Image: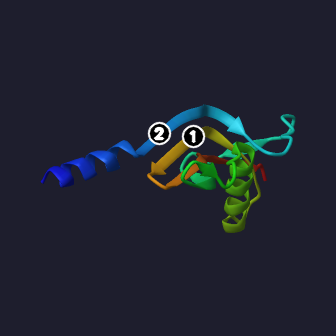
Amino acid sequence: MKRCVLGLSLCCLFAGCAWRTQIERGVVSTSAIDFGKRYEVDTSKKISGADRAHGVWLIPLGSPDADLAVQKTLADANKKSARKIVGIANTEVKFRLLWLYLYSQRWYSVEGNPIYEAK
C-alpha cells in the first residue's frame, strides 16, 4: 500500500498542466488588413487552431509559435469556407503546457470569429 501511495505521489509530482491567456478580444491577422475597406465579422461562427511542439523529458523538440498558430487557423478555415477569411476577431490566444513525466507538449491555441471581405 505504501508503494502504491508513493508511486501515485511521484506521478502527481512529475505531471503538470498550465495555460496562460496571451491575447483576449483583439483582431489578429498574419497579413496587412486595409482598414479603408469594409469587412464583415460573423459572430455566429468560431474558428480555432493551434501550433504544437513536443518534448522528451527536459529536451524540447521544437518551439511553438503564436504567429504560426494564427496562420494555420486561417489556412484551415479558408479551406472550409466559401468566402475568404482575412483575420480573426474577438480572438483568444492561449499558451498551454502539458507535462507527463517523460513527455511534454507546449502549444499556442487560437480561437475567434472569422472576418470576411465584404461583398
Residue 65: % across, % down: 71, 46
Left of 78 or right of it: where is 105? left
- Where does residue 45 sit, x and y in percent of width and height? 56, 53
Q: Would you name the residue on which mark 1 appears?
A: 94
Residue shown at 47%/39% (left/top)? Answer: 18
- The amino acid type of the residue labelled 1 equals Lys
Q: Callout 2, which amino acid?
A: Ala
Residue 118 appears in the figure: yes
Q: Pointer 2: what residue?
A: 18
Q: Residues within 10 Å of mark 1 (few under 14, many from 20)?
A: some
Quadrant of the image occupied by residue 72: bottom right
Q: Is residue 47 above or below residue 25?
A: below
The structure residue drawn at horizontal position 77% and vertical position 58%, both measured from the top left corner, is 84
- What crowding class fits label 2: few (fewer than 14 Cα within 10 Å), some (14-19), or many (20 or more)? few
Secondary structure beneath dot 1 equals strand
Q: Position of residue 117 (x, y in %)?
A: 78, 50
- Tell me the CA gap for discs 2 and 1: 10 Å
- Element marked by disc 2: strand
The residue mark sitting in front, 2 or 1, is 2
Q: Residue furthest left?
A: 1
